[in-house]
Image: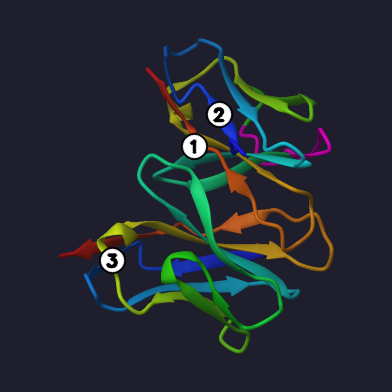
Amino acid sequence: DAGVIQSPRHEVTEMGQEVTLRCKPISGHNSLFWYRQTMMRGLELLIYFNNNVPIDDSGMPEDRFSAKMPNASFSTLKIQPSEPRDSAVYFCASSPGTLDGEEQYFGPGTRLTVT
Amino acid sequence: AQSVTQLGSHVSVSEGALVLLRCNYSSSVPPYLFWYVQYPNQGLQLLLKYTSAATLVKGINGFEAEFKKSETSFHLTKPSAHMSDAAEYFCAVRKGGGSQGNLIFGKGTKLSVKP
């Protein structure tokens, strides 16, 4: 299996621009997670989906952030407008389901730089 | 609410020495605990997990961890460090009881291995 696929791997954009990050989970996995990693705050869960439905978006920083999962094989995280403080590495992860002992499989991440 | 505390943001050991990375958790219900490793510029990879079976859990790359309920700890050990173990290690907890709980990650411990 190819694992969780994220694109782009690196994104540099100017403040105010729209940014879209993409994720393809592992085939057959029913849960998908978006995380943000920074030096200051560590690894934070932004939102997670189960069977394409958002379950918990309490970690989404503000209305500038939105996430969608139109089907089982694709999800996007959009930032509009972007700000320098959004600079971070964004990870997507998937897991087979929601059983407590199930692990999450992480993608390689997208490093976002907002200038 | 669940939480994890990793003691020591940086740990340095010599090659061949014992590796001990500390993790304490807080959970009101029986927890599920995970250790992940992150190599530079990569996503997180599962090392091992505790799911209420054996208290001593063996993982990949020679790592193991012991669940101690009385101490609320889940420390990660490896008898002999290798240069390739240099990475950042994250402890995570997930609420048990059949919930759809998320993984809560610690701040991470960066392991350096000296030749």
Measuring from the top left, give residue A39's x and y in whole percent: 39, 44
Image coordinates of residue A85 in percent, x first then y, are 45, 29
- Mark nearest the camera among 3 and 2 is 3
Q: Which residue is mark 3?
A: B82
Q: Nearer the viewer, mark 1 or mark 3?
A: 3
Q: Are marks 1 and 2 in contact (CB under 8 Å)?
A: yes
Quarter of the figure with the N terminus of chain B: bottom right
Count the numbered circles shown: 3
Which image quarter is the C terminus of chain B in? bottom left
- Judge whether A33 appears above or below B78 on screen: above
Residue A53 counted in the magenta span: yes
Look at label 2 and name its amino acid: Gln
Q: Chain of mark 2?
A: A
The residue singled out by tag 2 in the image is A6
Q: Secondary structure at mark 3?
A: loop
Classify mark 1: residues with Cα within 10 Å, few (<14), some (14-19) or many (20+): many
Residue B18 coordinates in the image, percent (x, y): 31, 79
Residues rendered magenta in the picture: A49-61
> What colour scheme was applied to this rendering of the protein?
rainbow
Mark 1 residue type: Pro
Which mark, by number, is residue A108? 1
Circle 2 crowding by C-alpha within 10 Å: few under 14, some 14–19, many from 20: many
**Residue at x 69% of width, y 72% of height:** B51
Q: Chain of mark 1?
A: A
Residue B2 against residue A23 in the figure, above or below: below
